[in-house]
Image (cartoon, grey):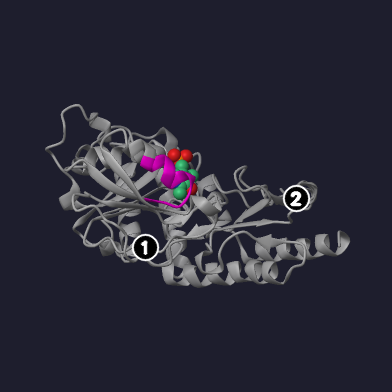
Amino acid sequence: MARVYNFSAGPAVLPEEVLKEAADEMLDYNGSGMSVMEMSHRSKVYDDIIKTAEADLRELMGIPDDYAVLFLQGGAWTQFSAIPMNLMKNGVADYIVTGQWAKKAWQEASKYGKANKIASSEDETFSYIPDCSDLPIDDDADYVYICENNTIYGTKFWQLPNTKGKTLVADVSSCFLSEPVDVTKYGVIYGGVQKNIGPAGVTIVIIRKDLIRDDLDEKVPTMLKYKTHADANSLFNTPPAYGIYICGKVFKWLKKQGGLAEMKKKNEDKAKILYDFLDSSKLFKGTVRKEDRSLMNVPFVTGNDEFDAKFVAEAKAAGLENLKGHRSVGGMRASIYNAMPKEGVEKLVEFMKKFEAENA
Ligand SMILES: *Cc1c(COP(=O)(O)O)cnc(C)c1O
C-alpha cells in the first residue's frame, strides 16, 4: 500500500487512523453484525452514532445550548439558497464577496431578495480581505454573509467583520475545526465537510435557535427549512448516515489531538514551513496579501505556465498529489488541512527547493 501526500482542496485527505478504524468496522460495526452503511438510521446503534457525533462536535467547538447542530445533505451550495429562504425576514441581506464561493452565495440570494454586495476584493483577483470595520450595513439587513476561508484564493478573515449588530452568517467549509471559534459571534456557521472533516455528502449547519422560524413562506420546500431538521434532530428523512459516522470518528480524532487550540498550533506550524519558504524563494511566490493568508489553502505560482505544469507533474511523480491550482488563479495550490501531516508539508518544501535548484 502506498499512500500519497494528498494536497487536494476537497474532497481531501482524512486521518489515516480514522480510515483504518472504519475499514476494521466495515463488515461488523461494534457487534451489530452489519456495516454502518447497512443499518437503519432509526436503530438504537445508529442513534448512538449520531448523538455521540453531535456531542463531540459541541464539545470541540464549545457550541452553546441555544444553538442547533444540523447534519444535512446537498453541500454548501444548497445552503446558498437555504440561508436566504430561512433568514430573510425583511428580504434584505449584505454580502461580502471575497471569492467565487461568496459570489455564488450572493448571486443565489439575489433570487430571493435584495442581496447587497457591500464589499469585494474581486478587483485584485480576491487576493486579499477588504477592510470590514465600517461597511455600509443596510438598516434592514437580516444578516451579513461571509465566506470565512476562501478555498480557491487562499485568504482568511482573521478578524470578523463589524456587522453593526446584524446576524453574521459564515461559510466555513474550508476552515471548519481548524482553530478554536467563538460560536456566539455567529448566527449561522456552516460548511460542507469534505474539505476539513469527512467524506463528501454531509453539510453541517450550526444555527442559533431563535433564527429557526416556523413562519416561512409556504412555498419554501420542506427539506430546505431549518425547522424541519432541527425538530427531528437531523433524522427527518434518511441522513447521510455513513458520512456522519466518519465525521464522528474525525471528531474523536481531533479530541485525541488535543482539541482545536492544539489543531491551530499544528496548522500554524505547518503553514509557516510553506510560507517561510515561499517568502525566501526566487522561483515560487505566494499570491495572497500576507496578513490575509489562510492556514488551510496556500496558492503559489512561478509566474511561468510551463514551469507550473512541469512542477505539478514532477511533484505527482514524487508522491505529492493534487497541487494544480484552481483555474481562476493558475499555478499551484497546496491544501494543508487538519489531516495533512507535517511531514507532508516538509516533503513538499523539500521538493520545491530541489525543483528551484534544478530550474534556476
Ligand atoms: C467547496 C466549497 C463550497 C462548495 O461546496 P459544495 O459542498 O460542493 O456545494 C462552498 N464554499 C466553500 C468555502 C468551499 O470551499
Q: Is 99 one of the magenta-colored residues?
A: yes
Mark nearer the viewer, 1 or 2:
1
- Callout 2, which amino acid? Asp
Q: Residues within 10 Å of mark 2 (few under 14, many from 20)?
A: many
Could you tell whether 59 is left or right of 7 in the image? left
Residue range highlighted in magenta: 96-106
SS label for mark 1: loop
Above or below, 204 against 297 in this view is: above
According to the image, label 2 marks what residue? 308
Q: Position of residue 12 (x, y in %)?
A: 56, 48
Ligand 1 contact, mark 2 (Cβ < 8 Å): no
SS label for mark 2: helix
Q: Is 124 one of the magenta-colored residues?
A: no
According to the image, label 1 marks what residue? 132
Q: Is residue 317 visible?
A: yes
Going 85% across and 65% down the picture, which residue do you hit? 357
Q: Position of residue 350 (x, y in %)?
A: 76, 65
Q: Position of residue 110 (x, y in %)?
A: 32, 37
- Callout 1, which amino acid? Cys
Closer-to-camera residue (293/94) = 94
The furthest residue to the left: 215
